[in-house]
């Protein structure tokens, strides 16, 4: 990925995050869950990179490791040229202003004992960017920004619906005027009609402030809507990355193809004639992944070579990366 | 109407909560024909699950209470049955599959034990017969080494496999009706595709009627022949599946379909969202429950709650407005 120019905001190289498995009274390490096992990608300034995959594929771990909420086992994360994996303490804390996160569960990610005002004000006070009085003004501005009534700042999270809580989480993330936000499944806990509200809000905020998003989700339809480019993960590795239209129109990895064909379309006429690739079996355990290509145990086109070596994540045409030995077969 | 296998009429269910009485289901009527798949769609709290639980006599009471309604099934009213009687219907003639296969299976009993119990209870099989039938059912739902897996516990199965076990259990007594409440919501899309594929296959082989409750308009599009849309405890629209998606007439249905992005076709610049929140009904509204969020709301909507009217063959809608004419019907 040799794009060294200035429009790359985040550059992740060979990111690895293993969680140790401990056993016995001496808690000796007997293995590791290879949650993320060598992932490389870039996020360009002002874009939304969608990161999709099924449960346990390592997409959330990747998001957290990028922000150093989990320290990566190895690999590097360059943010504006600074390697976050080498930065620590006060310096990292300062960097964090620029990078924020929106969490999946709006019920668990807001402290139930703090008022909405206190929740949104906290980052401002922690980072010393505003005095108490100034901070209160800023809280009101932020609530208005996410289309909530500024008078709500004295209420507690339980008084709000899921969609409104997610707006509060967004206001908190915006408090420090970050340029990069990792959105970890921000809408999957919400009802259908509320999902569209939150996605529209995220898009408006992006246009207004020039935000860069890493948008993690399992909903391929929503990712298609919000993303400029999309990356697909399977069992700790990235299998495909391309611009949005390229990925949805010409998926080259057999997993991406199967994933896209499995998504139901809200149109009975299309559904009646659609061809599905139904994958057999379940995702293997990330503690003991298959040799070679991770997907080979469920892949409809796997051959002997797939068990022997791991396919390289290569650029098969400009901007389209894929990790499959046989991707050429699907090139149009 | 004699051609319905199961016919629910004017069902009303309430729940007593600390904040007051919640009107969860407010006069719901629908029928299920033999061999058809009926989709029931709506968001959390719209009353779709409570409707089915009421029909099955599974509403915990208190706090729940069935205020009114009938559910005719083979000439008998399920609502009037004693606990014993309805228990004989559940499992034997009406099978059920729920959203979370981990909490609906007993973690301390083997899968074999849980599968054979209804067979011995409802069909009077011997243990040996029941075990053979259980193994056969597991095979039908696509579990490899079915015979050996009877002695496994639920935690030894993955989420998708557990849902297959649930389906095997629901279908083991060859019921005429299968009620599935969000059976694929907790599963990944590739596993969801496996399960819906399995249900389609079983439907063709066994010919049971299905009520499929979901919030996912995509799953329903590929599975159901007829769809009911619920909002605030009311049925607000009902139509054959093609008609509903091509020609939705209730503003809520229109909003719901418009707010969905798709993996295929043209991508809209901006999703059509429905502003506001779904209601929690502490009293039965006199106005249309959707009026506070409706784009087409008129004077009349605030004074009278619309009733379901047939506007086209098999297409019923509860709305005073004609969205095509942008005015009253």
Image (cartoon, rainbow, N blue to C red):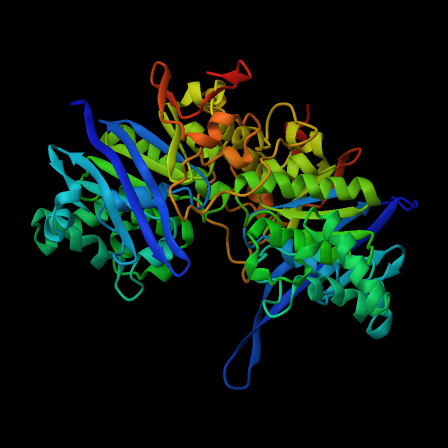
- In this image, B269 relative to B319: left or right? right
Q: Position of residue A25 (x, y in %)?
A: 51, 86
Instruction: Give A36 or B148, whichever is nearer the viewer.
Output: A36
Q: Position of residue B304 (x, y in %)?
A: 41, 29
Residue extending farthest to the bottom is A26
Identify the residue shown where x is 18% and y is 54%: B116
- In this image, A74 relative to B276: left or right? right
**Considering the image in quadrants, where does the N terminus of chain A appear?**
top right
Q: Position of residue A310 (x, y in %)?
A: 65, 49
- In this image, A107 relative to A215: left or right? left
Position of residue B44 relative to residue B319, above or below, is below
**Considering the image in quadrants, where does the C terminus of chain A appear?**
top right
Instruction: Give B248 or B66, whichever is nearer the viewer.
Output: B66
Mark yes or no: residue B140 visible: yes
Identify the residue shown where x is 35% and y is 37%: B212
Instruction: Give A252 or B81, whichever is nearer the viewer.
Output: B81
Residue A323, image quadrant: top right
Q: Position of residue B185 (x, y in %)?
A: 45, 45
Mark yes or no: residue A325 visible: no
- Total count of labels: 0
Residue B73, image quadrant: top left
Position of residue B86 relative to residue A25, above or below, is above
Identify the residue shown where x is 26% and y is 45%: B54
- In this image, A268 relative to B10: left or right? right
Identify the residue shown where x is 21% and y is 32%: B6
């Amino acid at each position: 990925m040799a794009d060294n120019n200035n429009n790359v905001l985040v550059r992740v190289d060979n990111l690895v995050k293993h969680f140790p498995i401990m056993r016995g009274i001496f808690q000796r390490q007997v293995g590791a869950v290879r949650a993320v096992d060598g992932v490389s990608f870039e996020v360009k300034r002002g874009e939304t990179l969608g990161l999709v995959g099924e449960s346990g594929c390592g997409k959330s771990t990747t998001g957290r490791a990028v922000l150093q909420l989990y320290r990566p086992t190895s690999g590097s994360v360059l943010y504006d040229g600074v390697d976050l994996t080498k930065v620590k303490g006060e310096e990292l804390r300062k960097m964090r202003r620029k990078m924020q996160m929106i969490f999946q569960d709006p019920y668990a990610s807001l402290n139930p004992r703090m008022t909405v005002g206190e929740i949104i004000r906290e980052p401002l006070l922690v980072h010393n960017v505003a005095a108490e009085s100034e901070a209160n003004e800023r809280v009101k501005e932020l609530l208005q920004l996410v289309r909530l009534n500024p008078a709500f700042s004295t209420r507690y999270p339980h008084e709000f619906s899921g969609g409104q809580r997610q707006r509060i989480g967004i206001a908190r993330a915006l408090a420090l005027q970050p340029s990069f936000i990792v959105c970890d499944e921000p809408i999957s806990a919400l009802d259908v009609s509320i999902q569209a509200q939150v996605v529209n809000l995220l898009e408006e905020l992006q246009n207004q402030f020039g935000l860069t998003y890493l948008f993690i989700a399992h909903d391929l339809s929503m990712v298609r809507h919000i993303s400029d480019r999309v990356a697909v993960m399977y069992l700790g590795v990235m299998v495909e990355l391309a611009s949005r239209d390229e990925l949805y129109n010409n998926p080259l990895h057999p997993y991406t193809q199967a994933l896209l064909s499995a998504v139901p379309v809200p149109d009975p006429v299309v559904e009646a004639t659609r061809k599905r690739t139904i994958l057999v079996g379940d995702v293997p355990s990330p503690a003991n992944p298959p040799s070679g290509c991770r997907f080979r145990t469920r892949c409809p086109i796997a051959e002997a070579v797939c068990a022997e070596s791991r396919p390289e994540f290569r650029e098969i045409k400009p901007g389209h990366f894929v990790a499959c030995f046989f991707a050429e077969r699907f090139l149009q | 109407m004699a051609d319905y296998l199961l016919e629910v009429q004017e069902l009303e269910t309430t729940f007593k909560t600390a904040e007051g009485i919640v009107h969860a289901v407010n006069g719901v009527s629908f029928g299920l024909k033999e061999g058809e798949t009926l989709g029931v769609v709506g968001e959390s709290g719209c009353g779709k699950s409570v409707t089915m639980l009421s029909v099955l006599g599974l509403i915990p009471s208190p706090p729940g209470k069935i205020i009114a309604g009938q559910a005719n099934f083979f000439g008998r009213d399920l609502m009037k049955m004693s606990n014993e009687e309805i228990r004989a219907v559940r499992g034997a003639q009406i099978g059920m599959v729920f959203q979370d296969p981990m909490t609906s299976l007993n973690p301390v009993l083997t899968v074999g034990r849980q599968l054979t119990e209804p067979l011995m209870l409802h069909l009077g099989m011997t243990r040996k017969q029941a075990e053979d039938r259980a193994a056969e059912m597991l095979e039908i739902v696509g579990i490899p080494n079915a015979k050996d897996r009877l002695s496994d516990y639920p935690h030894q199965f993955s989420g998708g496999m557990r849902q297959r076990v649930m389906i095997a259990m629901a279908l083991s007594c060859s019921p005429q009706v299968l009620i599935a409440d969000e059976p694929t919501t907790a599963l990944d899309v590739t596993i969801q595709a496996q399960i819906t594929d399995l249900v389609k296959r079983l439907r063709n082989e066994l010919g049971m009627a299905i009520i499929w409750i979901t919030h996912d308009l995509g799953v329903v599009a590929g599975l159901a022949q007829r769809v009911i849309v619920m909002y605030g405890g009311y049925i607000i629209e009902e139509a054959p599946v093609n008609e509903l998606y091509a020609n939705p007439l209730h503003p809520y249905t229109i909003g719901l379909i418009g707010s969905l992005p798709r993996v295929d076709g043209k991508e809209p610049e901006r999703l059509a969202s429905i502003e506001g929140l779904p209601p929690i009904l502490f009293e039965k509204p006199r106005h249309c429950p959707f009026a506070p969020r409706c784009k087409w709301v008129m004077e009349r909507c605030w004074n009278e709650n619309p009733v379901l009217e047939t506007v086209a063959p098999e297409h019923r809608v509860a709305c005073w407005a004609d969205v095509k004419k942008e005015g009253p019907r």
